[in-house]
Image (spheres, rainbow, N blue to C red):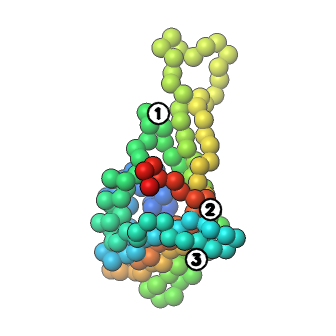
Amino acid sequence: MSDERKIQEVLARYVRATDRRDGKAQGALFTDDAVVQIQVRTGRDSYEPFGDPLIGGAGVEYAVENLMAPHPEGGSSHHTTADHIIDVDGDNARISAQFVVFSVQAAARPADGWPEGVFGAQGTVRPIESGYYETALRRIGGEWRIVKHDVLMDMPIAVPGA
């Protein structure tokens, strides 16, 4: 497998771990000294940091397991990435990708079964977040690991009580 494909797969594993709320799997993709910073758009081409950066795989694991809201009953999320731009320079690399996050909510199956004439998937899918991932990686022991990860959000973030 090419380095570019291996790097793209790191990002694919990252978004899947986020969707599953699997902090251990997500944290394993980062070096111990990695820096993760969420940033929110403040202008056409400007961003400002949102909160303190997460440090290392342990910080990422903690954040996923303790700060991300669990999915509601019948709910899930799906991150998609697109337009990957990958640059490899020896054991260092960068990937830039667009992302969209979809909230998925399955409809509850009625106790008496679906009504006559109901057909197909039942529930809703709606976009809730978008932005860019700007990620630096390093090859360590033959494996690509994230050393810096900026999440550039297209929209502001509201936090209750803040």
Which sits in the foreground, 19 or 153? 153
Binning the other alpha carbons within 10 Å of mark 2 as few (below 14), some (14 to 19) or many (20 upward) gives some
Q: Which mark is residue 86?
A: 3
Quadrant where the image shows the C terminus = bottom left
The answer to whether the residues at label 2 and label 1 have Cβ atoms under 8 Å apart is no
Which sits in the foreground, 50 or 6? 50
Q: Which residue is mark 1?
A: 74
Q: Residue at x 61, y 66 (%)?
A: 41
Q: Which residue is mark 2?
A: 154
Binning the other alpha carbons within 10 Å of mark 3 as few (below 14), some (14 to 19) or many (20 upward) gives some
Identify the element where label 3 is drawn.
strand
The answer to whether the residues at label 3 and label 2 have Cβ atoms under 8 Å apart is no
Residue 45 is situated, as x and y percent measured from the top left of the image, at 67, 74
Q: CA distance from mark 3 to mark 2?
A: 21 Å
Q: Quadrant of residue 33?
A: bottom left
Q: Is residue 20 above or below residue 72?
A: below
Residue 22 is situated, as x and y percent measured from the top left of the image, at 36, 53
Q: CA distance from mark 2 to mark 1?
A: 27 Å
Question: Label 3 sits on what residue type?
Answer: Ile
Disc on the earlier residue, 3 or 2: 3
Q: Is residue 141 visible?
A: yes
Q: Is residue 147 above or below residue 161?
A: below
Is 100 left, or right, of 159 in this rendering?
Answer: right
Q: Residue at x 51, y 46 (%)?
A: 77
Q: Quadrant of residue 4?
A: bottom right
Identify the element where label 2 is drawn.
loop
Identify the element where label 1 is drawn.
loop
Q: Is residue 94 above or below residue 89?
A: above
Binning the other alpha carbons within 10 Å of mark 1 as few (below 14), some (14 to 19) or many (20 upward) gives few
Question: Label 1 sits on what residue type?
Answer: Gly
